[in-house]
Structure formats: structure tokens, C-alpha cells
Image: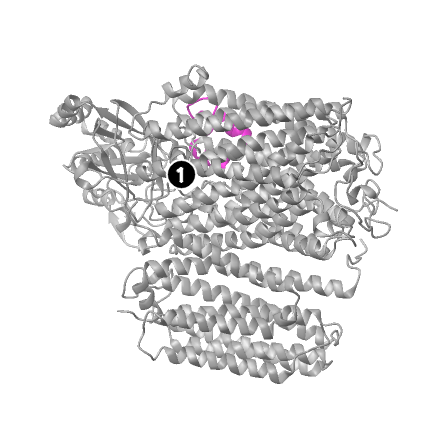
């Protein structure tokens, strides 16, 4: 196969078969490709033969053939139907395996929450990752998928796995990684502005690496990342982008959200007509429960970050918010519309 | 520019109009059909919430309205017979009765809406009902389905007015009254939609 | 088609039948509710619609083609609801 | 007899015309205009995708571009194009009628269509829409900050034009056939327009109500798809695809009808298996209603629904495959001239076959899990819609051009354009199959580096394709004014439309033709 289609060989190299059902899906796909190739070759050969042989200038026998049309029609109807049925059953059997999620005890369980535009990944022991998922090779993983805002889709091409995350329900899916490595996680269902940036990585590790990561590397890594920023403000800026706040709240963002430049200490008019002062408590509550106090003139569309942004990170975000003030000759703050 | 007819005979034209209107009715069935499908799906999913929602509706509003609409359909059907006997005045009376009953239906419908507004049962405006959250799905479907039906009634009333005007000007006779037949078909069809809405919305049994 | 207009009396008869059916379905709500309540009320609604279609809309006097078109919409709606339910009624069944 | 073009030249004589041929021309201009808008969006998208980073437009703009492209191309070009242009013009001629059954309704449908189009244009000009043409909730109903309402209203309105056209054509075919023109004497183009009309009439209303529900949810902030109330976003998808999958057949069936005309004419032979062809058109239309769930295999729809819809999807492929076999069999022992329309028809058969076979891949459950919502799907439906329908439309346009304009087009240039379009199309969309298999999701403004090369090839192809599409626009316009006169029947084709003058006379026929034989009755060779 690979020797026949060198181009195709490089393709499978570029897209590894990294889950237990990836080779089976590829098997069906290869079967479909071969069947399609056979059909295309036959049809093309027939068409070209007829076109050349019966071109107008050619002197050939054109008298009508005496055959029973219905026999031919029945033959190719039945033939097509049979081939299709084979592929239906083949595809359905593998599909059922993809959908047959192992029981809780037989697999590691991971919660995945999709949110515009990030993957929030929670392990049962409390470990929490954003846009990255560490898993153990050859160990089935059961995913519990939910969405906070709109429909997303968990798509790992190397696993040949895709499952939509639908707001309002928890959907399960599973895979068994068979190769160590780092694989891209895409959002395959269009979910808004930064849909194409809603990427993640699935890191499939050997037992040793995974144990090391479990033992504390992940904390150290997180701490190291934090320590490279020397003060709370700059790490707050990083979090501001990491959690996607900047997508809506940057002054030049398209989404209609209040600009936060110079917000600290301002009086803010809320949609119920009352005023509050934007102090630490207000900022804290607004990050975690945005819909409780909506700024007048805005639609309550910001998701709740309660349980999403850890408390230390919230504090860093607040430090950052305090630090951004309008440039000296700037226009009056846009925060209170 | 000259408006020439594509038809070769009046019979051909008549049967074409008939077929066109029945095709329109098939379209309408699917138009309401989307709502019926949504209704069926949710009713299977949330039977208790739907029963609870149904019990917030006033049984008598729905029942009386069904009777009103059936009566208006009878008037329309009789009007159709009258003009076949060239009785224009009788047709005019029938049209008037049909339209008045249609108006009565809408009056009852809107007083029911007002009643629900007072009960704080209007989603998107003042919905404050106790009960399962899915009950609001039922109430929403109630408003959308009956609202769409009422909109069709309004169109029907417009068409009846047009018929009345044409009849007043003496345009109909036993051999030429296609518009009466067309509008009649439409009016009866809207009646049928209500005939299904009535049990689906008002008569959900409370199963325990 | 103008030739054979139905007598008004027959239409009144159909109307009375419709009212009877309405009374029937309304009284049925007084009975203890059961699994059959909804099928019965929908059955009555179907009967009413059939009466309206056949007599008021005079489907009886129409050619087969028109009857076919009258049913087509309902047929397609049945397909729609039926196939949609293959999803909603089998949710959560084991694979 | 005065030709329909000479029957009046005032603006009023066009805008108030009841002549199906003039209405067809009005539609021709309108859909061509929308095609150019949709194509511009496509050009900008391909240009953006030339590099992995998003450096030509912002993400928001890109999202508006693909939504614009989808909405305009689906509802304002592909769905109306063949029925309202070729169907309107040819259908009454092909059945020997004086006009469609309801000429006023026909004109009204154009005005309704234009109103819908203006609403869509308003939405585009004043900020655009970023939901994708599928309007999935809750994104469209709650989260999108764009002109969803106006755009949905535009589509809603245009839907009524579709329904009006459908009712008109159904009644026309039933009631206005010439004496002797029995059902199994109808040209396959008429069959295909008839089947298409049935879908328009029975599916479009469901789209209308679905859009209404979505708009109500957006307007009142509460609706039946709202997950907070227990509403199910999947119900929206069921409702949407109950229309939008059959709509795919609205977009391809008329193309199949056109191709049957072209193949028989330029092979000078009766179509192979006429009755099977007619029946398969109807069964595609019918079965097409039963397969919508295959858009939802990974949506968390029930596994059993997935099995049912997959099986039904395979079944709808059977009649499509049969049609391909029959077209090729028609060439056998024919006398083939490689005229431009035939080149388009052959292009259609080739591209439709590839589109169909990849459609079979997508109907296969496990494979679809991987391929769904990737560029594989994008390539697949472009092979059907553009490779299929647009090729057929251009083929039909060339074939009936003499009847429409009374002129001939420059044959060599036209053949060259057909070849350029075919090559450009494949260069654009074939790489997208590979991209999809490698995992590139659709609707992506930026993409990982590894997809770069194939995207560059695709964009180059789009440039070629663009040139290809401009050529007919230019030379057909030229031919309309300067082309040589065509005469009533330049192709020596059968079919009633060729028995009257070119351009067609105002009232189509001097006297109602009488049909005595089967269609495509070419003399034995």
C-alpha cells in the first residue's frame, strides 16, 4: 500500500495512529479508498474508451445493442447496495467500540470543560490543567465532557476521536493512547471569535515520566512559570491573557465588554441603577460571578469563573487590574459608561 | 406585458388553483410541524413538567375556543354551498359570521394571554412560576404555537375581508367563485391546526 | 365541481359530530388519567381533522392527486417526528 | 413572432413582467450578483489561509467572511440558481406550456427573494454575522455579537420565494403539460425540477420555523433551545438539518437533470435507462429527507439514531451511483461531439463521482468521527455543490444560451474555460481532502504550521478557478451583443424548447405542440 502510494505513506507518518481505535478507523478508510479507487479507475476507463471510440468522426458500429436494460440496472443496483452494506457494518462496528465507554473502574476519569476559548481539564485528584492533558500510555481514559457556554468539540486527530461538548449536558467519550508523545487537541465545532486558537495538547507519557509528573513536576512547573514573572502584576497580565479575559476586555476588543483600564477605585453604575465602588471585593466578585453585578449598558455574557480561576490567580489578576491606568494624556476612563 | 393566461380552459385553471392551495397546505403542515416535533420531543423528555405546565392553562378557554372555531368553519362551509346556488347575500352573511367567530376566538385567546400575564406566566417578560424549570419550555411552546396560530387567523381574517369586498361588488357567481373555495380551504386548515393544539396543550393528563 | 354541492343539512350534521367529539374529549378529562388519555384525545383530534378534511374541505369530491397532496404533508411530518424520536427516545441506551 | 427580449425595453416592462423568461433573466442577474459577493468572500478567505498566522484580517472578520460565503452561496446562489434561472426559463418551454401556472406568484417570488437578499446585504454591510451558515444555538441565540437577527430574517424571507417557486413548478408540471406529454415522456430536466420543487415545498417551512425559534430565543433571551431551561441544542440541529440536508438535494438534483440533457444531446442517443433515471431522481428526493442525522454523528446524538441515519445515508447513495452508471452507459455507441456543454457535463460526472464517494466515507460511522467538521467535509460538499451544481449550471447555461440570447458563444474560448475551471477546481479542493484527513478543522482562521503547504496549493487553485469563472462572464456578455445568430436549434437537439425560435418568442409557441413520442428520440445512427 505504502509503496504503491508514496504520498499516502508520508501522510500516515504525519498523522500517527496513537490510540487503540486509530488503526481500525484507518483500516476502514483505506478500504474505502481502495474501493473508491477501483470505481474511479473503472468509470474513467469506460468513459475515456467510449469518448474516444464513439467520437463523431470515428467509423464504428453504432447500432443499438440488444440487451435487457433492467438486467444491467438490477446488477449494478444490487452490487452497489451490497458493497455499501459491507462498509456500513464495518463502520458501525468500530463506531460502537468508540462509543462503548469503559466502566469507571477500568479507566482514568478526566473532566473536560470547554469554554470560549480554552480547555479546562480536571483530574479526579484535584490536579487541574489548562489546554494540556497529561495521560498515561496504554491506560484507557474516560472523558466527561461539558461545555459552559456554546458547543465545542473535543478533537484529537492522532486518536481519530471527536466528540461535541454540549452545554447543559455531560457527554462521555474515551480513548486508549498507545504511543507516547504530544498530540494536538483542536476544537472542531465553531465556537466564536478565537475558535481556531482553542488548541490544546494531549501529552501521553510512559509510566516513569507520568509518575514523575504526578509526583510534583506539575507543581514545580507551574511554580517555575509563575516565578519567572517577578511581580504579581506581570504574572497577572499573563493570566489576563491565559484565561481569555483580554479577548473581550481589551479596549480594542470587538466583543462589547467594559474596558478595564483605570477601573480600580471608580464608581460603576450597574444595570439595576445602583452604583458600587470598584474595590478589591467588587473586582473579585465580578471575576468569579460576573452575572451578579452587571455594568449598566452591557449584556450579561461573561461566564462564571467560580472554581475556574484559583484564588491565588484571582489575586494576581486584581493586582494587574489595579496597575493598568490610562496613559497620561489619555481620554477619560471608558470603564463607566 | 399583456397578462395572458397560461391555461387552456377554466377547468384547467380551477384544478391548478386547487392543487396549488393543497400544496400550500402541505407546506403549512411542515411549518407547524417543526413546532409539533419540538413539542413531541420535549414532552417525551419532560412528561411531568409538561403536565404541570398544562395545568396552569385554563381548560375552559381552550374548550370554548375549539367550539367557536368549529362553528366558524361550519359557516365558511355553508357559505361555499350558498354561492354555488348563486345566493350572494347568504354568502355575505356566512362570511360575516365566520369572521366574527374568528374575532371572538382571537378575543378569547388574547384575554387568555392577559390572564397569563397577570399570573406572571409569560416567558421573557414576567415569568415567575413555581415548578420545574422545564415547565417554562412548555409555556414557551404554548405561546409560540398559539401565537403562530393566531397570526394565521389574522391572515385568514384579512382574506375574509377581501372576499366580503369582492362579494359586495358582485364578483362571485355559481360558476366563478374560486377565491371563496381557496380561502375556505385555508380557513378550515387553520381550524385543524387548532384541533390538534387543543389536546396537546390543554389536555395533558397528570400521571403520577 | 360546482354541480354537486353538498346539502347544508349534511354540513350541519358534520358540525354536530364535531361538537360531540369535542364534548367527548372534554369529558374524558374528568375520568382518572391513564396512559391511554393522550392517545384517546389525539385519536379524537385526528377524527375531527378527518371530518373537516373530507366534508368541509370536500376532499371527498377531489381527484386522487389532490388527496395524495393532502396526505403528503402529514406523511412527511410523521417521518420527521419518527426519525427525530430515534434519537431522543434512545438516549442513554447502552451501546 | 416577437422574441421575449424584443417585447419591451422599458424598465417597467422588465420589473413588472409576468413572462417566465424575463423573470428568469431577472433571477439570472440577481443570483450572479450574489455569486460575485460570495466569491469575493471566498477569495479573501483563501488569501488569509495562504499563511498559517492570521495576518490579513482579524479572527472576527474571518468568521464573518465564512459565514457570509456560506449564507450567500447556499441560500442566495446554489438553491435558487438552476430552478429559478434555467428552470424558470426552460421548464414551460420544455413541457410546451405558455407560461408557469401562476405568473404573478412567479414575479412575486422574485421580489420576495430580492427583499430577503437586501436584508442579508444589510446584515453584511452593517457588521456581518459570525455564526457560520448553520446558526447553531446557543452560539447564535445567545453568544454571538453580530447581526444574526437581520440575517436570519433575510433567509426566512428568501425561504418564501423558494416555496412560491416550488408550488408554481409543481402545479405547472402537473397541469400544463402539452397534449401527449405523459409523465414518462418528460425530459429528465423536468423530472429533476419537479423533484426539487417537492423538497422546496416540504423542507423550507421547517427552516422558516427553526429560524423563527432561534430569533425568538435571541430576542427574548429565553427560548426552547436554552440549556438552562432543559432545552436541547441538539433539537435545533435536528430541525435545522431536516431542512438543510434535503436542501443539499435542492442544490444537486437540478444539476443531475441538466447533465442528462447534455449527455443525450451530445452523444446523440437516448438516455440509458430512462425510467430508472426518472425514478432515481424521485427516490433521491424522498430518501434525502431521511438522512439528516448524519450531520450529527459526533453531536452526542444517540448511538442508535447514528446507526439508523448511517444506514439510510448509504441507501441514498445507491440511486446517485445508478445515475452515474447510466450517464456513462449513455455514451456507449453514441456519436460524441466535444462541445462545451458536454465538457461541463463530463466534468460534473467526474467531480460528482468523487464527491459521492467521499460522501460514502462520511456516511461510514467510525470514519466520520474522525473526518466530521474537518476540511474533508468542506472538500466533499464543494465537490458536490461547486464541482457538481456549478458545473451543471454552467453546462446548462451554455446549452440553453442560444435559446436565452439567440446567439452563439465563442466555442474555443468556452472549451478552454471549461477545462480551466475543471483543473482549478481540483487544485483548490483536492488538497482539502488531505488537509481534512490530517485533522485540520473547518472554520479556522489560523492553523498549525504543518498544514501550510496544502493550503498554499489550495489557494493557488482558487486563483485559477477564479479566472475560470470570470471567462464565461466575459464572453457570454460579449456574445449577447455580438455573437453570431444561433437559429432555433443549433445543437439539433430534441425537446420542445428547441422547436420554437431563438430567442424564445414572447408566448413560447405559435400553437400548442403535440407530443407523440418518447424523449431524446434521436434518429438511429
Q: Say left or right for A174 vs A191.
A: left
D103, B165: nearer the viewer: D103
Asked if residue D125 shows in the view, the reply is no
Write down the chain letter for disc 1. A
Q: Is residue A182 magenta?
A: no
Question: Whole-percent x and y of residue C37?
Answer: 36, 72
Q: Residue at x 76, y 21 (%)?
A: A58
Which residue sits furthest right? D1
D464 or D98: nearer the viewer: D98
Q: Measured along the vertical axis of the image, is residue C85 above or below residue A91? A: below
Left or right position of C20 against D110: left
On-image quarter of the C terminus of chain B: bottom left
Would you place residue A197 above or below residue D519 in this image? above
Q: Residue at x 36, y 23 (%)?
A: A15
Element at badge 1?
helix
**Horizontal and vertical percent for residue A324?**
27, 32
Q: How is the image coloured?
A: one colour
User: What residue sits right under mark 1 in the picture?
Assistant: A89
Residue nearer the viewer, A276 or B15: B15
| Left or right: D266 in relation to C83 | right
Most distant residue in the bottom direction: C9
Instruction: Decide which of A14, D58 is in the foreground and name it.
Output: A14
> Mostly what secondary structure, the magenta segment?
helix
How far across and down, in percent of the image, does residue D231 sit? 35, 54
Mark 1 crowdedness (10 Å alpha carbons): few <14, some 14-19, many ≥20 = some
- Give x and y (percent) for residue A186: 35, 31
The answer to whether residue A333 is left or right of residue D133 is left
What span is colored magenta in the figure? D42-66
Q: Give the quarter of the image for residue D257.
A: top right
Amino acid at each position: 500500500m505504502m509503496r504503491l502510494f508514496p504520498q499516502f505513506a508520508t501522510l500516515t507518518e504525519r498523522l500517527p495512529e496513537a490510540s487503540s481505535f486509530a488503526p481500525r478507523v484507518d483500516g476502514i478508510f483505506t478500504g474505502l479508498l481502495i474501493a473508491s479507487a477501483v470505481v474511479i479507475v473503472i468509470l474513467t476507463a469506460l468513459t475515456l474508451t467510449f469518448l474516444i471510440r464513439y467520437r463523431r468522426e470515428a467509423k464504428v458500429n453504432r447500432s443499438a445493442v440488444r440487451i435487457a436494460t433492467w438486467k444491467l440496472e438490477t446488477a449494478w443496483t444490487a452490487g452497489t447496495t451490497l458493497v455499501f452494506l459491507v462498509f456500513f457494518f464495518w463502520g458501525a462496528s468500530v463506531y460502537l467500540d468508540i462509543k462503548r465507554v469503559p466502566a469507571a473502574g477500568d479507566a482514568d476519569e478526566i473532566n473536560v470543560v470547554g469554554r470560549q476559548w480554552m480547555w479546562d481539564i480536571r483530574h479526579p485528584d484535584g490536579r487541574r490543567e489548562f489546554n494540556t492533558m497529561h495521560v498515561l500510555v496504554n491506560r484507557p481514559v474516560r472523558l466527561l465532557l461539558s461545555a459552559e457556554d456554546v458547543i465545542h468539540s473535543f478533537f484529537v486527530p492522532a486518536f481519530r476521536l471527536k466528540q461535541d461538548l454540549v452545554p447543559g449536558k455531560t457527554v462521555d467519550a474515551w480513548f486508549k493512547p498507545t504511543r507516547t508523545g504530544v498530540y494536538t487537541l483542536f476544537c472542531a465545532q465553531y465556537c466564536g471569535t478565537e475558535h481556531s486558537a482553542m488548541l490544546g495538547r494531549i501529552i501521553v507519557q510512559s509510566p516513569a515520566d507520568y509518575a514523575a509528573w504526578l509526583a510534583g513536576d506539575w507543581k514545580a512547573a507551574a511554580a517555575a512559570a509563575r516565578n519567572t514573572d517577578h511581580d504579581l502584576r506581570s504574572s497577572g497580565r499573563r493570566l489576563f491573557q491565559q484565561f481569555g479575559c483580554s479577548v473581550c476586555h481589551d479596549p480594542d476588543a470587538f466583543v462589547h465588554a467594559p474596558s478595564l483600564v483605570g477601573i480600580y477605585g471608580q464608581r460603576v453604575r450597574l444595570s439595576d441603577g445602583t452604583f458600587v465602588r470598584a474595590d478589591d471585593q467588587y473586582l473579585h466578585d465580578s471575576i468569579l460571578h460576573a452575572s451578579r453585578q452587571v455594568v449598566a449598558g452591557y449584556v450579561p455574557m461573561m461566564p462564571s469563573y467560580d472554581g475556574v480561576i484559583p484564588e491565588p490567580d484571582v489575586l494576581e489578576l486584581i493586582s494587574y487590574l489595579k496597575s493598568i491606568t490610562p496613559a497620561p494624556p489619555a481620554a477619560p476612563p471608558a470603564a463607566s459608561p | 406585458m399583456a397578462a395572458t393566461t397560461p391555461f387552456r380552459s377554466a377547468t384547467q385553471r380551477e384544478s391548478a388553483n386547487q392543487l396549488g392551495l393543497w400544496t400550500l397546505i402541505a407546506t403549512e403542515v411542515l411549518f407547524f410541524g417543526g413546532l409539533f416535533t419540538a413539542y413531541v420531543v420535549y414532552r417525551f423528555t419532560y412528561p411531568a413538567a409538561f403536565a404541570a405546565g398544562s395545568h396552569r392553562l385554563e381548560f375552559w378557554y381552550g374548550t370554548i375556543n375549539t367550539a367557536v372555531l368549529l362553528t366558524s368553519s361550519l359557516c365558511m362551509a355553508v357559505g361555499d354551498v350558498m354561492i354555488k346556488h348563486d345566493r350572494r347575500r347568504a354568502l355575505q352573511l356566512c362570511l360575516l359570521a365566520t369572521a366574527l367567530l374568528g374575532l371572538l376566538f382571537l378575543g378569547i385567546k388574547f384575554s387568555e394571554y392577559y390572564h397569563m400575564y397577570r399570573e406572571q406566566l409569560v416567558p421573557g417578560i414576567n415569568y415567575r412560576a413555581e415548578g420545574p424549570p422545564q415547565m417554562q419550555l412548555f409555556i414557551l411552546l404554548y405561546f409560540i404555537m398559539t401565537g403562530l396560530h393566531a397570526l394565521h387567523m389574522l391572515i385568514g381574517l384579512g382574506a375574509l375581508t377581501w372576499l366580503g369586498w369582492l362579494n359586495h361588488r358582485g364578483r362571485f357567481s355559481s360558476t366563478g367563485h374560486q377565491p371563496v373555495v381557496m380561502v375556505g380551504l385555508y380557513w378550515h386548515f387553520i381550524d385543524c391546526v387548532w384541533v390538534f393544539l387543543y389536546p396537546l396543550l390543554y389536555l395533558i393528563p397528570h400521571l403520577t | 365541481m360546482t354541480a354537486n354541492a353538498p346539502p347544508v343539512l349534511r354540513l350541519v350534521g358534520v358540525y354536530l359530530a364535531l361538537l360531540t367529539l369535542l364534548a367527548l374529549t372534554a369529558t374524558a378529562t374528568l375520568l382518572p388519567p391513564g396512559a391511554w388519555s393522550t392517545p384517546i384525545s389525539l385519536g379524537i383530534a385526528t377524527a375531527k381533522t378527518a371530518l373537516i378534511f373530507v366534508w368541509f374541505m370536500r376532499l371527498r369530491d377531489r381527484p386522487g392527486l389532490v388527496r395524495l397532496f393532502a396526505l403528503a404533508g402529514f406523511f412527511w411530518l410523521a417521518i420527521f417526528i419518527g426519525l427525530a424520536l430515534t434519537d431522543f427516545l434512545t438516549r442513554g441506551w447502552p451501546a | 413572432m416577437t422574441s421575449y427580449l424584443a417585447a419591451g425595453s422599458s424598465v417597467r416592462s422588465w420589473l413588472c413582467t409576468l413572462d417566465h423568461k424575463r423573470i428568469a433573466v431577472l433571477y439570472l442577474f440577481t443570483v450572479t450578483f450574489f455569486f460575485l459577493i460570495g466569491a469575493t468572500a471566498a477569495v479573501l478567505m483563501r488569501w488569509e489561509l495562504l499563511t498559517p498566522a492570521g495576518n490579513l484580517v482579524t479572527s472576527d472578520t474571518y468568521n464573518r467572511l465564512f459565514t457570509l460565503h456560506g449564507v450567500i452561496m447556499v441560500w442566495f446562489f446554489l438553491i435558487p440558481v438552476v430552478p429559478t434561472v434555467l428552470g424558470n426559463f426552460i421548464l414551460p418551454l420544455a413541457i410546451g406550456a405558455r407560461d408557469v401556472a401562476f405568473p404573478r406568484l412567479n414575479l412575486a417570488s422574485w421580489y420576495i427573494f430580492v427583499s430577503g437578499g437586501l436584508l442579508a446585504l444589510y446584515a453584511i454591510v452593517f457588521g456581518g454575522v459570525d455564526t457560520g451558515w448553520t446558526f447553531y444555538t446557543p452560539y447564535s441565540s445567545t453568544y454571538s455579537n453580530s447581526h444574526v437577527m437581520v440575517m436570519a430574517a433575510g433567509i426566512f424571507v428568501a425561504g418564501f420565494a423558494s416555496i412560491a417557486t416550488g408550488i408554481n413548478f409543481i402545479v405547472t408540471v402537473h397541469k400544463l403539460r402539452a397534449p401527449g406529454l405523459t409523465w414518462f415522456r418528460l425530459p429528465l430536466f423536468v423530472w429533476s425540477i419537479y423533484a426539487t420543487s417537492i423538497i422546496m415545498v416540504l423542507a423550507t417551512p421547517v427552516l422558516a420555523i427553526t429560524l423563527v425559534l432561534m430569533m425568538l430565543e435571541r430576542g427574548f433571551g429565553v427560548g426552547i433551545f436554552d440549556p438552562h431551561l432543559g432545552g436541547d441544542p441538539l433539537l435545533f440541529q435536528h430541525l435545522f438539518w431536516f431542512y438543510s440536508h434535503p436542501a443539499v438535494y435542492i442544490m444537486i438534483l437540478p444539476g443531475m437533470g441538466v447533465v442528462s440533457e447534455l449527455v443525450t444531446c451530445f452523444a446523440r442517443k437516448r438516455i440509458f435507462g430512462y425510467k430508472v433515471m426518472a425514478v432515481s431522481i424521485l427516490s433521491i428526493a424522498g430518501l434525502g429527507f431521511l438522512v439528516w442525522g448524519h450531520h450529527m454523528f459526533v453531536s452526542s446524538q444517540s448511538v442508535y439514531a447514528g446507526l439508523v441515519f448511517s444506514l439510510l445515508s448509504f441507501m441514498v447513495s445507491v440511486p446517485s451511483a445508478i445515475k452515474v452508471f447510466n450517464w456513462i452507459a449513455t455514451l456507449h455507441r453514441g456519436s460524441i461531439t466535444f462541445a462545451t456543454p458536454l465538457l461541463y457535463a463530463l466534468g460534473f460526472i467526474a467531480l460528482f463521482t468523487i464527491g459521492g464517494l467521499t460522501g460514502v466515507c462520511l456516511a461510514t460511522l467510525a470514519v466520520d468521527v474522525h473526518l466530521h467538521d474537518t476540511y474533508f467535509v468542506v472538500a466533499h460538499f464543494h465537490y458536490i455543490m461547486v464541482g457538481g451544481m456549478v458545473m451543471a449550471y454552467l453546462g446548462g447555461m451554455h446549452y440553453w444560451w442560444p435559446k436565452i440570447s439567440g446567439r452563439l458563444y465563442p466555442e474555443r474560448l468556452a472549451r478552454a474555460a471549461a477545462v480551466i475551471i475543471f483543473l482549478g477546481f481540483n487544485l483548490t479542493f483536492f488538497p482539502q481532502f488531505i488537509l481534512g484527513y490530517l485533522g485540520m478543522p473547518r472554520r479556522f482562521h489560523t492553523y498549525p504550521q504543518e498544514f501550510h503547504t496544502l493550503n498554499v496549493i489550495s489557494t493557488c487553485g482558487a486563483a485559477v478557478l477564479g479566472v475560470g469563472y470570470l471567462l464565461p462572464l466575459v464572453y457570454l456578455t460579449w456574445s449577447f451583443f455580438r455573437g453570431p445568430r444561433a437559429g432555433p436549434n443549433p445543437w439539433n437537439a430534441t425537446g420542445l424548447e428547441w422547436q420554437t425560435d431563438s430567442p424564445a418568442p414572447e408566448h413560447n409557441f405559435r400553437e400548442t405542440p403535440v407530443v407523440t413520442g418518447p424523449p431524446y428520440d434521436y434518429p438511429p445512427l
